[in-house]
């Protein structure tokens, strides 16, 4: 699901987050997979934004979101959004939180560094399709000081209610949907909801407590159809990568 440099696969404070969850739940009935709808604007939802080339209106790469870090400058996304074995690192990326209809309410933060697992670098291994991205200050502020950051959660298990919010390439507004995670394998999980097309890779999987427990990526680079999205399971692999990114 994403836009990856090699080939485009496909590539949320509690009350505001609950609104996102409710909006997603309204997307469909209980017996069939829901379909994503336009995400309501909220300060918490504005922690999610676009990764684009050079400017907010530049070519879209993927979706990313701010996670809490000591440097207050860290994003999480899918590894295939920012690096591939064939292309290498994707240069000139900027992060625009809360982007909507051509408007950048907080400005944009240029990407400074990217941390991915060596096994992704060497082999595009889908078991390691997650990346942490640091961004430079903008207007004298770190990105987390501008929009806040969600905590990162690992070892949470399957069957969790999450909202997934991201930016399809064909839309100037983010979409969101809520459902429960399911096991795809011991190290991969899935989320069934329609509408997650190119550009939504890297979209965070956010629980009702505001914790990010996954991002669209992993198996099939996040999914080959708009109705099923994947993520690597956030476990010790992600804990170690976060440690490296914040060292």
Image (cartoon, rainbow, N blue to C red):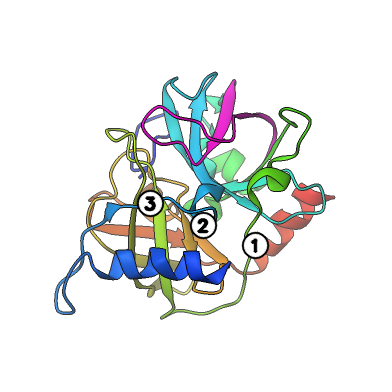
- Which region is colored magenta? 91-116
Task: Estimate how packed mark 3 is, as few (under 14), some (14 to 19) or many (20 or more) residues with alpha carbons within 10 Å.
Answer: many
Task: Estimate how packed mark 1 is, as few (under 14), some (14 to 19) or many (20 or more) residues with alpha carbons within 10 Å.
Answer: some
The mark lying in front, picked from 3 and 2, is 3
Residue 142 counted in the magenta span: no
Between 47 and 239, the residue placed more toward the observer is: 47
What residue is at 34 percent from the left and 70 percent from the top? Answer: 22
Spatial CA span between label 1 and label 2: 9 Å
Can residue 52 be seen from the camera position used here? yes
Q: Position of residue 138 (x, y in %)?
A: 71, 29
Q: Position of residue 107 (x, y in %)?
A: 59, 30
Between 177 and 81, the residue placed more toward the observer is: 177
Between 195 and 121, the residue placed more toward the observer is: 195
Spatial CA span between label 3 and label 1: 17 Å
What residue is at 45 percent from the left and 79 percent from the top? Answer: 158
Spatial CA span between label 3 and label 2: 11 Å
Seen in the picture, residue 42 relative to 28 is either above or below; the reply is above
Label number found at residue 107: none
Q: Is the N terminus in the top left, top right, bottom left or bottom right quadrant?
A: top left
Disc 2 designates what residue?
Answer: 127
Question: Disc 1 vs disc 2: Cβ atoms closer than 8 Å?
Answer: yes
Label number found at residue 222: 3
Residue 100 counted in the magenta span: yes
Task: Estimate how packed mark 2 is, as few (under 14), some (14 to 19) or many (20 or more) residues with alpha carbons within 10 Å.
Answer: some
Q: Secondary structure at mark 3?
A: helix
Going from N to C along the chain, the mark reached first, 1 or 2, is 2
The image quarter containing residue 192 is bottom left
Q: Secondary structure at mark 1?
A: helix
Disc 1 designates what residue?
Answer: 237
């Amino acid at each position: 699901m994403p836009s990856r440099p090699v080939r485009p696969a496909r590539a949320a404070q509690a009350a505001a987050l609950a609104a996102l969850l409710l909006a997603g739940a309204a997307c469909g009935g209980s017996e069939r997979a829901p379909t994503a709808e336009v995400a309501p604007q909220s300060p918490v939802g504005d922690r999610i934004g676009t990764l684009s080339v050079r400017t907010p209106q530049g070519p879209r790469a993927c979706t990313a979101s701010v996670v809490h870090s000591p440097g207050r400058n860290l994003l999480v996304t899918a590894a295939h959004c920012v690096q591939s074995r064939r292309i290498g690192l994707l240069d000139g990326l900027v992060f625009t939180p809360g982007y909507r209809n051509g408007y950048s309410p907080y400005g944009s933060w240029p990407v400074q560094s990217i941390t991915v697992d060596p096994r992704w670098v060497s082999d595009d291994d889908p078991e390691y399709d997650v990346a942490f991205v640091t961004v430079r200050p903008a207007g004298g502020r770190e990105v987390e000081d501008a929009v806040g950051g969600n905590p990162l959660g690992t070892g949470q298990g399957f069957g969790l209610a999450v909202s997934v919010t991201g930016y399809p390439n064909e839309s100037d507004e983010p979409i969101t949907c809520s459902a429960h995670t399911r096991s795809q394998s011991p190290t991969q999980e899935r989320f069934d909801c329609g509408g997650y097309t190119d550009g939504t890779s890297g979209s965070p999987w956010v629980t009702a407590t505001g914790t990010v427990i996954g991002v669209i990526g992993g198996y099939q680079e996040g999914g080959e159809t708009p109705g099923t999205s994947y993520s690597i399971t956030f476990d010790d692999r992600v804990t170690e990568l976060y440690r490296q990114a914040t060292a």
